[in-house]
Image (tube, rainbow, N blue to C red):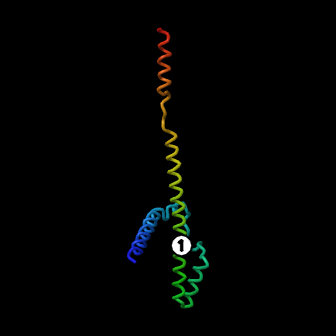
């Protein structure tokens, strides 16, 4: 039993580290979205259902639907954060490969230099 508890704790810590890594990407592209006013935003079916349940006085079902809506929104945030993280990693990989290609090589190697020196000495022989 003790070892299974340790395994679940280590799995949870790994999941927490992955989640912490993704939180830095939450809302990173929000600055590219146009500002929306409250009147123009259309409600989803789930939001309409929540409003209907509140109007009817069915608070328990409204809370359940609200939890589902929050879970859905978190899932969307996580999916966008994963896409952003993957894009950043791919871009870094491309930059690393380009840097590796850009490394300067000497215009001449030892063999070419030796040939040039022996060629220049031929006139003196």
Residue 50 falls in which quadrant of the image? bottom right
Residue 114 at x, y percent in the picture? 47, 21
Viewer-proximal residue, 1 or 56?
A: 1
- What kind of element bears circle 1? helix
Viewer-proximal residue, 15 or 65?
A: 15
At a point 43% along the width and 68% down the height, the residue shown is 16
Q: Quadrant of the N terminus?
A: bottom left
Residue 38 at x, y percent in the picture? 55, 73
At a point 44% along the width and 69% down the height, the residue shown is 11
Q: Which residue is mark 1?
A: 73
Q: Residue furthest top?
A: 125
**Vertical order, 15 against 47 (above or below):** above
Viewer-proximal residue, 63 or 55?
A: 63
**Vertical order, 24 against 73 (above or below):** above
Q: Residue furthest bottom?
A: 57
At a point 54% along the width and 90% down the height, the residue shown is 58
At a point 48% along the width and 28% down the height, the residue shown is 109
Decide: few, some or many residues near mark 1? Use Cα within 10 Å; few <14, some 14-19, many ≥20.
few
Residue 10 at x, y percent in the picture? 41, 69
**Vertical order, 66 against 30 (above or below):** below
- Numbered marks: total: 1
Q: Residue furthest left?
A: 2
Residue 24 at x, y percent in the picture? 45, 62
**Vertical order, 28 against 63 (above or below):** above
Residue 5 falls in which quadrant of the image? bottom left
């Amino acid at each position: 039993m003790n070892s299974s508890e340790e395994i679940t704790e280590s799995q949870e810590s790994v999941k927490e580290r992955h989640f912490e890594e993704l939180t830095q990407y939450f809302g990173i592209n929000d600055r590219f979205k146009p500002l929306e006013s409250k009147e123009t935003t259309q409600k989803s079916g789930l939001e309409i259902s929540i409003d209907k349940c509140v109007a009817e006085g069915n608070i328990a079902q409204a809370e359940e639907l609200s939890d589902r809506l929050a879970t859905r929104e978190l899932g969307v945030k996580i999916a966008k954060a994963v896409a952003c993280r993957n894009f950043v990693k791919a871009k870094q990989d491309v930059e690393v490969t380009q840097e590796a290609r850009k490394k300067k090589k000497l215009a001449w190697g030892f063999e070419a230099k030796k040939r040039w020196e022996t060629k220049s000495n031929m006139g003196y022989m």
